[in-house]
Image: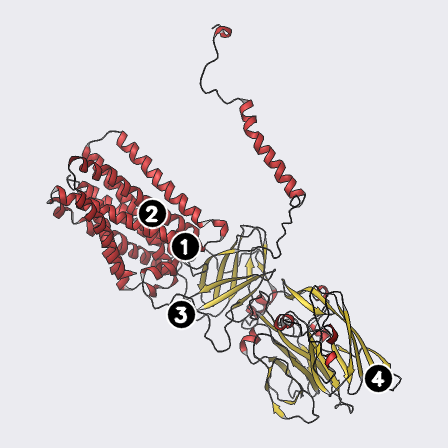
Amino acid sequence: MDRPSQDSAPPRSSEPRQAISRRSLLKAGMGGAGLVGAAAIGVSLNPSPGADVQGPQSEHVHGRHVMPAVVGEVDHARNGFNPTELLTDFDAGKISVLPNGQTLHEYTFAALDKAIEVVPGLEFAAWTYNGRIPGPTIRVREGDRVRIKFVNGSDHEHSIHFHGIHPGNMDGVFDAASGVVGPGGSYTYEFDAEPFGLHLYHCHTPPLSKHIAKGLYGAFIIDPKEARAKADHEFIMVMSGYDVDFDGKNDFYVVNGIPFHYDYGKNPIKLRVGELVRIFLVNILEFDPINSFHLHANFFHYYPTGTSLQPNEFTDTIALMQGQRGILEFRYKHPGRYMFHAHKTEFAELGWTGVFEVEA
Amino acid sequence: MSAPATPAPVGPRKPGLRTILLFCLPILLLAGVIGVFVFTNGAGLNITPAVPVESVQFGQTILRPAEIELHLRNTSPKEIIVSQINVNEATWPYAISPSRTVPRLGSAVITLNYHWVQGEAYEITVFSSNSIPFNVSVPVATTTALASKGTLWSFTLIGIYVGIIPVALGMFWLPALKRLGPRAMMFLMAATVGLLVYLGLDATTEALEIGSTLSDAFQGTGIVGIGIAGTFLLLDAISSRQRSIGRSEAGQRMTFATMIAVGIGLHNLGEGLAIGAAYAVGAAALGTFLVVGFILQNITEGLGIIVPILRDRPKLRSLALLGLIGGGPAIAGTWIGGLVYSQPLSVLFLAIGAGAVFQVAYEIGKQMIWKDCAKRQMPLEVFGGIVTGMLILYVTGVAIK
């Protein structure tokens, strides 16, 4: 879909409407393929009895006003991942202790070309880490050793570039010596986990925008040595988008891989009043300069990049550019259904939206 | 009859079984080749495209209060599956009938419960399962005119204003023109030819222009070619037949006038179609100024119809009939255009109109101008007339384009 950039006006027809001319009139009537023609006599208002009416629509019609939504449900099993499970899927890897006493976390990451049903009925030719978007959420403690064996099973060159502090040859940017891997090849990234906070990783092979937009990214959490307060729920949320028709503009926006997944009538996230909720929020959205997060009917403490144990803001809306991330903490005071979504309305209505269902 | 003695008759034989078989031979071979190609997956050619080739043709977009209805026809080589729809930066729920899976050349009706805003623009993207986007735009949203007594009457009125009234007004020149001498007559006939050629060019361009926006499967240029050539030759055949029946000179001239009226009528049908469709989009575009412009331009059409019969004393009834033939189709055009609009059909109608006026121009040139010129050379009158005819439409066209 031709989505205008942030500051441009909504799309308009190329024919200015005030031009009253015969030619423009003829064109208005007969020109571009889906101009408003006219109704066939007797076209009924409702789809015929045999019509393929999809679930969400009829529900919306009878229940409440129609809201943006996809029609149908994606096949999570075939995709190989389910955003509901991704929410709490923190991966510590294979844990062992090194001779020097350091804890070692070992992972194997594979780059895989994979068709993913991003919205019901539509397959996106994605590039993935381990067959899922976002990739696995790495979670280690500050000072631990991280060892990631990266196998490139894709047809293209890829790498893993971690945000964090590490040697240049672990940065995944320039060449084979620094972790850029050709098809069929492999490389092992190894470094100490620092600094504590919420970070991310993504492919850093040019053209970078393509490699990110296709799905090669994930979250990288380094917990502080002294653990944060115990939360009742910890959720990972990675914000991104899909340019399914490859025109350099996102057609759908998303948190955790599948647009609208946590929406009302779909798979809302269940909470209880008073529970402490901690969200690890990462923005890796390509093409659009800024993404955002807004929580309904509540405020949260915000820890930018998670590198401090003291929140620096108490708010209900934050903006993040690509690569920015932070930790949110909040409790719900009242039971109810509350939306969370990008406060760029367009992103929300194209998929980056969800609902917390809070019970007493 | 002693058959053995008779020599075999010379000349075309009746096609026997053998002939039919011989005709079928290449077709059978062809079927074999196609079979080999299909069952061996391209007979060695790697013909699987990297990305599926998909195209659709959108028909009417119908706007009702809080509802948008899209009509879509699959013009791609294979079936397509509609997956999701975005309306102006929002993914929107929809219902589709009869099915999300649309077979080749099959059609589907998509309904969106959407609170559109009067006068605003909408861009709708329909995604297929292969992530191919198909865009429909609604440049100016307004409730689509549905067939009712009211809308039919307004369409009829428009047809009367832009078709019947100007043609009839043009015919009122008849008494004045009767006083003209042969040179002026020649000039007028030439001017009629000029008018017709101009109208034909206009309709052809329009047909090609809309034809080029059709999906490949509809082959817009082909429709234009068939429409023009078919109509031209059909009318030519009819007029030759009329002549060969052997009527009086006056009768023949009346036939001419009728032919011109038919040609102009077909042209006005195409014009009515465009106006009707535009009116259905939003009556706003059809200003008073525009209607006046149409009257101004189409008045010359009435003039063209009566030129062949200036020497005669046509009955009032015949004149009324001619006016109706020339102007009436504009009404039918507005109905069709406004209520059951279809782009491929419009291309065909425009092409038919073009073919008709070209044929009439050719006919006048051949039968009247050349005949008269055989008696007396009037090259300047012919030149001046044709150019004037075209210029009249050009100048009146400036006012309304």
Disc 2 to disc 1, C-alpha distance: 14 Å
Query: Which amino acid is tagged 3?
Result: Gly
Chain of the residue under the numbered disc 3 shown in the image = B
User: Is label 4 on the same chain as label 1?
Assistant: no
Disc 2 to disc 3, C-alpha distance: 34 Å
Crowd tier of the residue under label 1, counting other residues whose Cα lies within 10 Å: few below 14, some 14–19, many 20 or above: many
Which quarter of the figure has residue A205? bottom right
The reply to whether callout 2 and callout 3 are in contact (CB within 8 Å) is: no
User: Is residue A307 visible to the viewer in this orientation of the structure?
Assistant: yes
Of residues B389 and B140, the one nearer the viewer is: B389
Q: Position of residue A245 (x, y in %)?
A: 57, 65
Q: Write down the residue under mark 2.
A: B354
Helix, strand, or loop for circle 3? loop
User: Is label 4 on the same chain as label 3?
Assistant: no
Q: Write down the residue under mark 4.
A: A103
Which quarter of the figure has residue B40? top right
Crowd tier of the residue under label 3, counting other residues whose Cα lies within 10 Å: few below 14, some 14–19, many 20 or above: some
Of residues B210 and B257, the one nearer the viewer is: B210
User: Along the horizontal axis of the image, is A291 left or right of B215?
Assistant: right
Which quarter of the figure has residue A349? bottom right
Disc 3 to disc 1, C-alpha distance: 24 Å
Q: Write down the residue under mark 1.
A: B210
Q: Position of residue A99 (x, y in %)?
A: 89, 84
Q: Nearer the viewer, mark 4 or mark 1?
A: 4
Which numbered disc covers residue B119? Answer: 3
User: Along the horizontal axis of the image, is B205 left or right of B369?
Assistant: right
Chain of the residue under the numbered disc 1 shown in the image = B
User: Is residue B291 visible to the viewer in this orientation of the structure?
Assistant: no
Disc 2 to disc 4, C-alpha distance: 84 Å
